[in-house]
């Protein structure tokens, strides 16, 4: 309990600029913590993110949702503009 209180006291003593510097140092050490890499990793297949030749492999759910979205857009456009 005493260790936890000392941690919170130290955190309260830190101002915003100090916290920003600490976070920048923390994230600068980890190359996987970049925003683009995090988004890219979340869009990758969780089982096998890359193919044998190193190409990106998208998440199967993303592929299915993209196909359904494209199909829905085509159907909506057809019934809006080309229905006799």
Image (tube, rainbow, N blue to C red):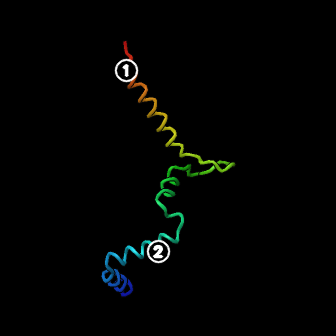
20, 80: nearer the viewer: 20
- Labels 2, 1: front one: 2
Q: Is residue 19 left or right of residue 49?
A: left
Taking the spot 53% from the left edge, 54% from the top edge, the residue there is 41
* Residue 26: image location, x then y, percent: 47, 73
Taking the spot 31% from the left edge, 79% from the top edge, the residue there is 15
In the displayed structure, 16 sits above or below 46; it is below
In the displayed structure, 5 sits above or below 23; it is below
Q: Which residue is mark 2?
A: 25
Taking the spot 48% from the left edge, 54% from the top edge, the residue there is 39
Residue at the far right: name it. Answer: 52
- N-terminal-most mark, 2 or 1: 2
Q: Is residue 34 left or right of residue 77?
A: right
Gap between marks 2 and 1 measured at Cα: 55 Å
Label 1 crowd bin: few (<14), some (14–19), many (20+), radius 10 Å? few
Marks 2 and 1 close (CB-CB < 8 Å): no
Q: Which residue is mark 1?
A: 79
Label 1: which secondary element: helix
In the displayed structure, 60 sits above or below 67; it is below
In the displayed structure, 20 sits above or below 1; it is above
């Amino acid at each position: 309990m005493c260790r936890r209180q000392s941690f919170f006291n130290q955190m309260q003593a830190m101002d915003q600029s100090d916290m920003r510097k600490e976070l920048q140092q923390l994230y600068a050490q980890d190359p996987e913590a970049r925003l683009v890499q995090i988004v890219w990793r979340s869009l990758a297949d969780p089982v096998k993110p890359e193919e044998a030749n190193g190409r990106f492999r998208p998440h199967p759910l993303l592929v299915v949702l993209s196909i359904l979205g494209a199909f829905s857009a085509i159907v909506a456009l057809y019934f809006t503009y080309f229905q006799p």
